[in-house]
Image: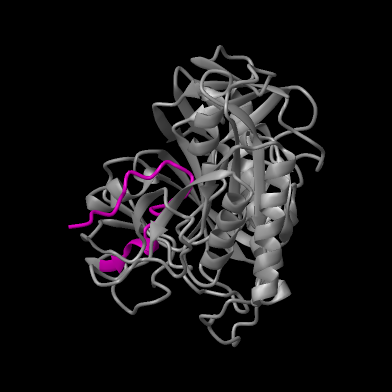
Amino acid sequence: MRLEVASFAVRDLEFGARTALWDHTLVVDRDELRALVLEDSHFSDVELHLARPGESVRIINGLDVVEPRWKVAGPGGVFPGFVSAPTAVGEGRTHRLAGVAVIEVSEPVPGEPTHFREQILDMAGPGAAFSPFGQTLNLALRFKPAPGLFPADAPRPKDVLGGSQEAFDYNRAITRAATRIAAHLARTSVDRPPDEVETFDLAPCAPDLPRVVCTYHYQGPFLYGLPVRLPFGALVHPNEAFDGALVGWRQAYRCTYWDQNNDALLQLCRHHGRDVNFVGCILFGDTSPSRAEKERIGSAVARMARMLGAQAALVLGINGSNLAVDTMLAIQECERLGIKTTLIYLDVGYGVDDPGFIHAVPEADAIVCTGSRDRPVTLPRMDKLIGGERLITSEADPRGELTVPMRYVHSSCSNQGFSRHTTRFE
C-alpha cells in the first residue's frame, strides 16, 4: 500500500465570503459551513469560532479534534464510514492542511457518560504549552442539539461509564459533522501545489532488519465508521490511520487528529527499510471485566504478532482503570513468545509515594513515560470563552483561574508519541 500525503502549510485562519485556500491562509465561509452542519436534523444550531495561538481564549466541553484531509487519488475516500464509503483506504494521494484543527465542542446531553469528559483548551498561558492544540489554528464547532432530542426536564448527565443510545447517536452525529467539515476544508487544496509530499510504503526490505510490530491499545471508538470492540485484535496498515479510518476521542488520551498524525506510526514508517522492517499495526481492546477476558486479549495480541513474524513490538498502552491489565498482559504474552517489547505509557500516580501503575508485570522493563495524567496544573484567567457557561466537574467560573488535573487539558496525555511530558524520579 503506497500513500502520498501532500501537506499544505496554513499560516493563518480567518472568516470570509468564500471558503478557499489563498497563499497559506485558509478562509472559511461561516454561513456555508453552518448550512452543511444543519443538513443533519440532530442539530438546532452550530456556532463557528476561531481560536489562534497566543489569543486569550479558553475552549471548554471539547470532544474530538480532526485535521482537514481530502483524498485526490486512489481507492476510497477520507474518513471512511463518515464522509466516504466504508471501504479500504491507505493508497493513492491525500492532501492535508497542516497546522489546522477542527475541534468539536458540545455540552453533555442527558444520557451521556461524563466520566473524565472534562476537556479544556487554552490558547495562551501555561495551558497552551501542555496541549498540542495550543499551537494550531483552530476552528471550533459548538453544536446544539435539536429541541426534541432531549427533554428540557431531563436530569443532568451523571459520572457513569455507560450511556443511552440517544446520547451515543447524537455524539456520532457530531463526529460525522466534524469530519465532513474537515474534508470540505481540505478540498480547497485540490488545484494548489503542496509545500511538501511524503510517501508511506511498507515495501519489502532487507531480511536482516529487525521485524517490528506496533500494538496499539485502541479505545476508538470507530473503525471504518463502526463502533468496534477488538478482543482478538485487528491488523491495520498505518496508511489507513493516515486516511482517517480510525476516528474518535477518548478523554485526554487520543483523538482523530493524533491517529491521522500518529507519531509512533509515522516514525516506524520513516525508519522502515533503514533500521527496521515495520510489519504493521495491531489494534486491540475490549470491555474486559474478568481475568479470563483479559488473558484472551493478551494472548490474541501476542499470537497475531507472532504470525507477522515480529521480533519486537512497540506497545501504545493505556494506564488507568482495569484497562492497564490488558496492556500488561499483552506485553507479558509477547515476551513469553520471544517478542521484545517497549511500552509508551503515562503515569497515573498521585505523588512520589505512588507507583504510578494500576498493574505491572516484570516483563515490562522498557517503558517510555509520557507524564502524569493526575499532575495538577493551574490555568490563568482567559478573556474569551467558547463552549458554554459551566464546567462539568466544578461550579467554578470557567473563564477564571482553574487548577485541574492534567487529564482535563485536551490531548495532554498521549501514548502516540507526540507528548513532550515525562515523569522525573528523584
The residue lying toward the viewer, choosing from 374 and 23, is: 374
Extreme residue in the left direction: 426
Seen at 69% across and 27% down, the residue is 71
Seen at 75% across and 47% down, the residue is 224
Extreme residue in the top direction: 193
Seen at 30% across and 68% down, the residue is 404
Q: Main secondary structure of the magenta part?
A: loop
Q: At which x and y percent is residue 158?
A: 53, 82
* Residue 328 part of the magenta-drawn span: no
Q: At which x and y percent is residue 167?
A: 66, 71
Instruction: Say which quarter of the image contains residue 418.
Output: top left
What segment is highlighted magenta in the picture?
A: 403-426
The residue lying toward the viewer, choosing from 423 and 165, is: 423
Instruction: Say which quarter of the image contains residue 55.
Output: top left
Q: Is residue 392 above or below residue 310?
A: below
Q: At which x and y percent is residue 94?
A: 65, 25
Q: Quadrant of the C terminus?
A: bottom left
| Residue 17 in view | no
Q: Is residue 348 above or below residue 370?
A: below
Q: At which x and y percent is residue 201?
A: 66, 21
Q: Is residue 358 above or below residue 304?
A: below
Q: From the viewer's perspective, is 146 left or right of 263?
A: right
Chosen colour scheme:
one colour
Q: From the viewer's perspective, is 422 left or right of 161?
A: left
| Residue 415 in view | yes
Q: Quadrant of the N terminus?
A: top right
